[in-house]
Amino acid sequence: MTLRPEPEPQPAVPQTAQRTARRWLLFVHQLPPKASNLRVRTWRRLQQLGAIPIKQAVYALPDTANTREDFEWLKTEVKASGGDASVFAAGHVDTWSDDALVEEFRRAGQEAYAALARDIEQVLKRARAARRPRGTRAPATRRLLDVFRDRVAAIEGVDFFGSAGRDRVTSLLKQLEAHTSDRRETSTVKPGPSTSPDAYRGRLWVTRPRPGVDRMASAWLIRRFIDRQARFAFAVDQNAAPPDAIPFDMFGVEFSHHGEGCTFETLCTMFQLDEPGVARLAAIVHDLDLKDGRFGAPEATTLGAIIEGLQLAHPDDEALLAQGMTLFDSLYRSFEQSSRSAGPRALARPRKSAGPKRAPSRRRRHGP
């Protein structure tokens, strides 16, 4: 029997160190010297992905399935345009510590939230100073509100380590939403005592066949906020509907288009539904259904294509409506998630004035 020396005991790795160990992705690229358009396009794409510069032509992201896929796509784009790129995984990055990299990501997030907060404050200041007759619309402010929500979502998508400043942005958005709380005045219907949900529970709701965006969204709104036990059926008009049914999105009925608003907006007004997620859905449904671009909802085109696909895939109206309601429920959950506060966030320390280990300052508002 051969005897082997006992291995020397290795020092135990503290559990806290194990928990905080991170892996990073590095994107290293080289672009043709005269390809200025490719250079700008690549730089902008790196900014959108939330990557931070480590040194010239080297950018870093936390190593996750999503960031790996993002870098791989960008590598493909760069190579297809005549450049070269590689993606590496690393346990540490040159002279950077994990904490220093996390701080750099947090600083970038703070700067983005701070810039957005300044823009919201400017709009809020102008909106408060402007005097307009009571009940009139402020479409420009509402469109900016949607733009700000999209910017928040974009920052959150690359806020990998919970940067400070998001709560302030959320608070300012709520103030702006409150200032434009009459955004439902596109309908001439006024809320009244008859619109209590108690009178509309366990009912049969009837709408026209082949539901589209307004009927899908309205049916979802009814079951989500008004009548949890709602049943749905179809009829060509209100005269063909059962006597005890509640018609919606039909000509000449209470729950339909009124003024310049669609059925979804009418329901929101009559039942006083004004949650942030519902408000975003209302803007999308309005733009898709009425095609007037009033809110400039950026999701409208994509959602319209999805609904068209659902109509082609489901000849049965009940199945089509069910799929549409699921679609709007998913959108609502996403919008609500993005509007929630994530609680206190760590404040990144200011950058040191100079030093060889400091990465180039990350600027979001200027070109490369």
Image: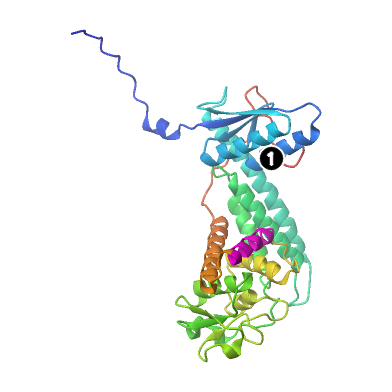
* Occupied quadrant, residue 286: bottom right
Element at label 1: helix
Relative side of 14 to 305, left or right:
left
* Residue 308, magenta (yes or no): yes
Percent coordinates x, y for residue 167 in the rendering:
58, 53
Circle 1: residue type: Arg
Image quadrant where one finds the C terminus: top right
The residue singled out by tag 1 in the image is 45
What secondary structure is the magenta-colored segment mainly? helix
Q: Say whether residue 230 is visible.
A: yes
| Residue 172 vertical position relative to residue 325 in the rendered view, above or below | above
348 relative to 124, above or below: above
Q: How far across and how far down the image is residue 34, in percent?
A: 81, 28
Residue 46 appears left or right of 137: left
Question: Of 275 and 233, which appears nearest the observer?
Answer: 233
Q: Nearer the viewer, residue 212 or 126?
A: 212
Q: Please tell me whether residue 156 is drawn above or below residue 123 in the rendered image.
A: above
Numbered range of the magenta stretch: 298-312
Q: Is residue 197 left or right of residue 304?
A: left
Task: Judge whether 207 appears above or below 131 on screen.
Answer: below
Q: Badge 1, how many Cα within 10 Å: few under 14, some, many 20+? A: some
